[in-house]
């Protein structure tokens, strides 16, 4: 196994995503929404997965207004979905787009912030369902359509606490560590046998609902807007980043 590189990198300004089809989970708000908009601005076909249909529809309208290819909505609850439901997404992509060039695994929940000693087991299971199991199921279901593309990119969204444990971050931290393991394992399996690239990216602190839940006393005005982070994802989705595979990436401060 190649050692994981905990590297920072610099994204170029204008990646080319024209003609590429990209599925983004958790597109209803926060970082996922910003990634979807950035991909659309670079003329990708965007597939917006989320459970809040009204928010997804509003985003699709915004995408239409900027003159990007029409977005496809995938109303989906990562907590309750069955294995068959993931297969249905992959089949839909195959029918409508033939192949998938980008899979952005972004959706996550924070769960409770509590010491392991006191952590609620039901919350623990819920966090792992959304943050880990659903991502395994989605990437597994999508591998056939990802492999059909000449070049495709899978991005797991990590966190600082997925690389260095921190007291009271419980299931969220453990789930992000698990994602790093999933990324590394999948990257090693795909290396040399397919054109699927797999990386993880720690976006760092951003002005989103999740951050506000974790740090209620923090002034959100001191944090970057997720729109400033989204171009790093577009870069990783584009062929400008072809050399990056199996990397645990961090955005430089
Ligand atoms: N914000 C930060 O400072 C920060 C720092 C490091 C890493 N991250 C990571 O960045 C990613 C995006 O976080 P964010 O800050 O943008 O969080 P956010 O504002 O809370 O957005 C999370 C997204 O995930 C979706 N989601 C949650 N549970 C779902 C479910 N069961 N089914 C479908 N969708 C579901 C949410 O949908 P709903 O709208 O329906 O709830 C929402 O679209 C996450 O992976 C997070 O761990 C964030």
Image: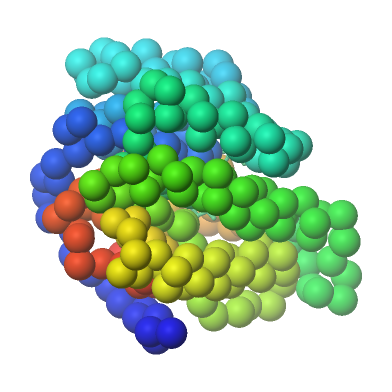
Residue 195 horizontal side relative to residue 75, left or right: left
Q: Nearer the viewer, residue 17 or 141?
A: 141
- In the depicted view, which residue is nearer to us: 49 or 148? 148
Q: Is residue 210 left or right of residue 195?
A: right
Asked whether the viewer can see residue 178, the reply is: yes
Q: Quadrant of ligand 1?
A: top right
Residue at screen point 52% across, 38% down: 26
Q: Quadrant of the C terminus?
A: bottom left
**Which percent across, then down, holds residue 6?**
37, 79
Corner quadrant of residue 83: top right
Quarter of the view holding residue 99: top left
Residue 187 % position (x, y): 41, 68
Residue 29: % across, % down: 49, 34
Does residue 64 sit above or below 99 in this rendering?
above
70 versus 201 height, above or below: above
Q: Quadrant of residue 21?
A: top left
């Amino acid at each position: 196994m190649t050692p994981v590189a905990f590297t920072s990198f610099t994204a170029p300004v204008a990646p080319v995503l024209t003609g590429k089809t990209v599925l983004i989970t958790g597109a209803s708000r926060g970082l996922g929404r910003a990634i979807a908009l950035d991909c659309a601005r670079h003329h990708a076909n965007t597939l917006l997965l989320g459970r809040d249909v009204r928010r997804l529809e509003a985003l699709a309208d915004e995408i239409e207004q900027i003159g990007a290819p029409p977005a496809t909505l995938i109303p989906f609850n990562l907590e309750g979905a069955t294995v068959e439901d993931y297969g249905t997404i992959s089949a839909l992509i195959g029918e409508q787009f033939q192949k998938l060039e980008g899979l952005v695994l972004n959706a996550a929940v924070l769960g409770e912030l509590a010491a392991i000693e006191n952590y609620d087991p039901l919350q623990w299971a819920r966090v792992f369902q959304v943050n880990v199991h659903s991502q395994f199921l989605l990437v597994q279901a999508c591998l056939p359509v990802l492999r059909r593309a000449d070049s495709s990119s899978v991005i797991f969204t990590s966190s600082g606490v997925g690389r260095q444990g921190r007291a009271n971050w419980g299931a969220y931290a453990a789930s992000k560590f698990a994602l790093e393991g999933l990324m590394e394992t999948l990257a090693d399996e795909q290396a040399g046998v397919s054109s699927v690239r797999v990386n993880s990216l720690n976006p760092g602190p951003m002005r989103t609902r999740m951050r506000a839940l974790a740090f209620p006393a923090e002034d959100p005005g001191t944090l970057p807007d997720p729109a400033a982070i989204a171009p790093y994802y577009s870069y990783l989705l584009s062929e400008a980043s072809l050399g990056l595979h199996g990397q645990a990436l961090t955005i430089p401060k």
